[in-house]
Amino acid sequence: MFILSQTPSIANHFLAELRDVSVQTDRMRFRRNLERLGELLAYEISKSLSYRTETVQTPLAESKTFLLRQPVVLATILRASLPFHQGFLNMFDQAENAFIGAYRGHHLNDDTFEVEMDYITSPNLQGKTLILMDPMLATGRSLEKVYHALLRFGVPAQTHIASIIASQEGVRYLKARMPECRLWLGAVDDTLNEHFYIVPGLGDAGDLAFGPKE
Ligand code: URA
């Protein structure tokens, strides 16, 4: 498991701005920080992928370089993940893409919820590198449900899960249920509250990025 905030770096500024109530209300900055953290996590993941050696022709001579051996598929859960996804696309600019509409369908009598999924589009995933992302890894149940739905499109050679803020509980859940997936996180927070929001977390990432919903 990789945790970006464990290393002192500028990434911690972006995380701090996402969390800070006096900064996070600037929606454009909020989205841009999700995107910047997507770029940084994409770069970290890229170091773990496999490359082939190629030669490119410059105007002066040949130059040896490393190029990705396998195509990458970026899969994102709507809607908060869209700016995060864009950050990944800024790095993996030739990636194929999958989009999934998933949301918490709340039970009326208590605070529990079922993950509802009503939209999924994906390229064939067989043998490819899948990067599945959601900026907030709270319980891990959305990611689990979406991952299993994506397997209908083929079994990836490897799956990376990227989140900006995870809860310890969510991390434990995914490690137990999906041990074949590698986790790439911005930060890991202590707890979930009674509404399954991450604490301290940052609040509702979708609302902060795109405005409140009905
Ligand atoms: N989704 C969010 O936007 N925030 C959380 O804390 C958990 C899920």
Image (spheres, grey):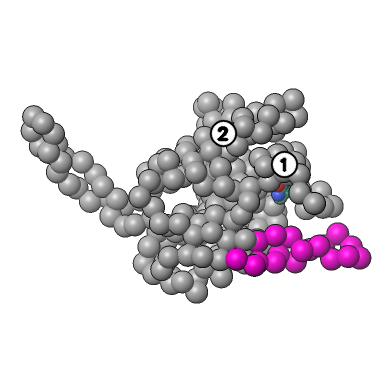
In this image, 62 relative to 208: left or right? left
Where does residue 163 sit, x and y in percent of width and height? 58, 47
Q: Nearer the viewer, mark 2 or mark 1?
A: 1
Where does residue 45 sit, x and y in percent of width and height? 43, 46
Crowding near the residue tagged with mark 2, few <14, some 14–19, many ≥20 C-alpha atoms within 10 Å: some
**Nearest the camera: 194 or 101?**
101
Q: Is residue 3 magenta?
A: no
Q: Is mark 2 within 8 Å of ligand 1?
A: no
Instruction: Kindly identify the amino acid type of the residue bearing the numbered disc 1.
Output: Gly
Q: Residue at x 65, y 61 (%)?
A: 102
One can see residue 16 in this view: no
Q: Secondary structure at mark 1?
A: loop
Image height check: is 95 above or below 4? below
| Residue on which the image places disc 2 | 32
Q: Main secondary structure of the magenta part?
A: strand
Among the two numbered marks 2 and 1 on one chain, the one whose residue lies closer to the N terminus: 2
| Range drawn in magenta | 102-119
